[in-house]
Image (cartoon, grey):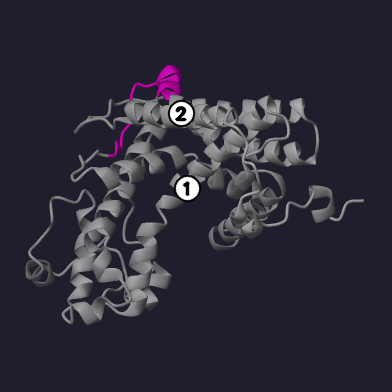
Amino acid sequence: MPVRNEYNAIIFAGTMGLIRKSALQEIGGWDEWCITEDAEASLRILKQGYKSIYINRPYGQGLIPFTFEGLKRQRFRWCFGGIQILKKHWESLMPWAHWVNPANRLTLAQRNLYLFGGIQWFTDALNLIFAAFLVLGGLFSIFLGQLTVRPMTGTLVVLPALFLILGLWRFTWVLRNKLNLTWVMAFRSMYSYFSLGWTVSLACLQGLIQKEGVFLRTPKTGSRSKVWRSLVVTRWEMLIGLICAVVGILAFAAHPEIRTLLLGSLLVWQASLYLSAPYFSLLSASDTLTLPSPKRGQPVLESRAARILLLIIGLLVLGAILVQFLPPPDEIPAYIRFLPEDLPLRKLLGID
């Protein structure tokens, strides 16, 4: 928010915020189609040329979700609403938006902050796709020996690993220096953020294909859910994490070398991200909880989406295996010259 304040691009978050009544009336009030109507309204107000101000001072205290299940509901709602805003207003956020609609008074900085604020939700979905390709590469290494899925194994795995290390260092550094956290607390906070990757990926998918969403109220009180409930609400995260861990370990065990070691390490890392969800879910249920949380709206169709995802991955694996039975080409394809040179990992890392 302090950065957004410098560019007059504040997102009205509702809690501890004030909005001028005349400005809200000028834009036609709240749009009930969006489940994050406060953030959507702030964008329409800024399009009219109004000024937004962030005061870096607490005026009250808010309540956070009491359980991990409540946190999943909250993050799903935020992401789904962010995708809704992006779908409706993306044309207003393009660099040429002012030329198309002169009434759009958003500056270039405002458009960039809102555009990338919406796009960033897809990070977890891309990470899930990356994990799926790593699993495919691991399965090929186990059952087909040296045959690999080229984009995610072999020499080209080094680049994602490098970006991963730099990204984690930057994430932890920001948490430590801006929030004055210890290394342990910064590390746990980072994992708490990543533990919601499956929920955000699901919200991205549903936000793209569904026109309307259901407002899933974030429980602000305790519930009677205990250990079993904590595991049930994170069952898909556990399944994805276990698949990544098992495939990574078996890939290295089948062919112990640098290539499979790096592949297995990335898979174990991906597994730790998804397995952190049941950890935090159990941690949130460790206290004595009192009042049951009221449930409103329809539950997220998490099981159906997960089954579809597993079916797609299974079909990709089956298709890749069937391709191996096709007859090889008579000559090397012409496009082979555009592929990067497949250097051995030992040579790339400078190991003699």
The image shows residue 181, relative to residue 197, as above or below, that is below
Tell me: 144 left or right of 238: right
Q: Position of residue 123 (x, y in %)?
A: 46, 51
Tell me: 46 left or right of 131: left
Which SS type dominates the magenta stretch?
A: loop
Which of the pair 85/50 is nearer the observer?
A: 85
Which of the pair 166/131 is nearer the observer?
A: 131
The image shows residue 27, relative to residue 276, as above or below, that is below
What residue is rendered at 25% in x and 59% in y? 39
What residue is rendered at 64% in x and 35% in y? 268
Report the label total: 2
**CA separation in Å, label 1 and label 2:** 19 Å
Q: Which residues are magenta?
A: 218-232
* Residue occupying the far front of the picture: 330
Residue at the disc numbered 2: 315
Q: Position of residue 133 (x, y in %)?
A: 56, 39
Magenta segment includes 231: yes
Q: Position of residue 158 (x, y in %)?
A: 70, 51
Q: Amino acid at mark 1?
A: Leu
Residue at the disc numbered 1: 126
- Residue 153 found in image quarter: top right
